[in-house]
Image (tube, rainbow, N blue to C red):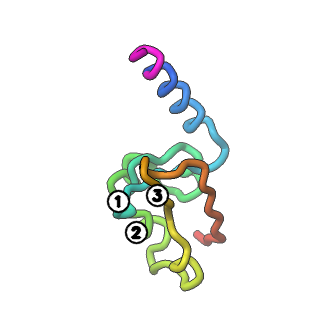
Amino acid sequence: MECQIERRTNELNLVIESAYDAYISIDAHDVILDWNRAAEVMFGWPRKEALARTITELIFPTGLPPAITVLPLYRRHDAGMILNYLLKFVLRR
């Protein structure tokens, strides 16, 4: 069982790293836990520099636009975070 979990985890990591869409994982305090290559290209921050910084610091340095502040940046349920929740924003570099 442990071997299967490790194999599936590795497969998931490969999918995330090879995705064309940016993948950003954040905690309850908006601190970046993971950041894939597509996020590096899209936002211009290498993974090593992005990890442990807040999402607002990197993507919204002047603060969240008013329309976005009403949207939840993540959704929770009893088991934790809900996956596959896509947020779209128009951003400028």
Residue 24 image point, x, y percent: 50, 52
Mark 3, secondary structure of its residue: strand
Q: Is residue 54 above or below residue 85?
A: below
Residue 33 image point, x, y percent: 39, 49
Residue at horizontal 60%, vertical 55%?
A: 85
Q: Amino acid at mark 1?
A: Arg
Is residue 79 rendered to the left or right of residue 41? left
Query: Looking at the magenta stretch, what is its main secondary structure?
Result: helix
- Mark 2 touching mark 1, by CB under 8 A? yes
C-alpha gap between disc 3 and disc 1: 21 Å
Q: Amino acid at mark 3?
A: Arg
14 or 75: which is nearer to us? 75
Within 10 Å of disc 1 (Cα), the crowding (few <14, some 14-19, many 20+) is: some
Residue holding disc 1: 53
Within 10 Å of disc 3 (Cα), the crowding (few <14, some 14-19, many 20+) is: few
What label does residue 84 carry, if any?
Answer: none
C-alpha gap between disc 2 and disc 1: 7 Å
Residue at horizontal 54%, vertical 59%?
A: 43
Q: Residue furthest bottom?
A: 66
Q: Earlier in the sequence, mark 3 or mark 2?
A: 2
Residue holding disc 3: 76
Residue holding disc 2: 57
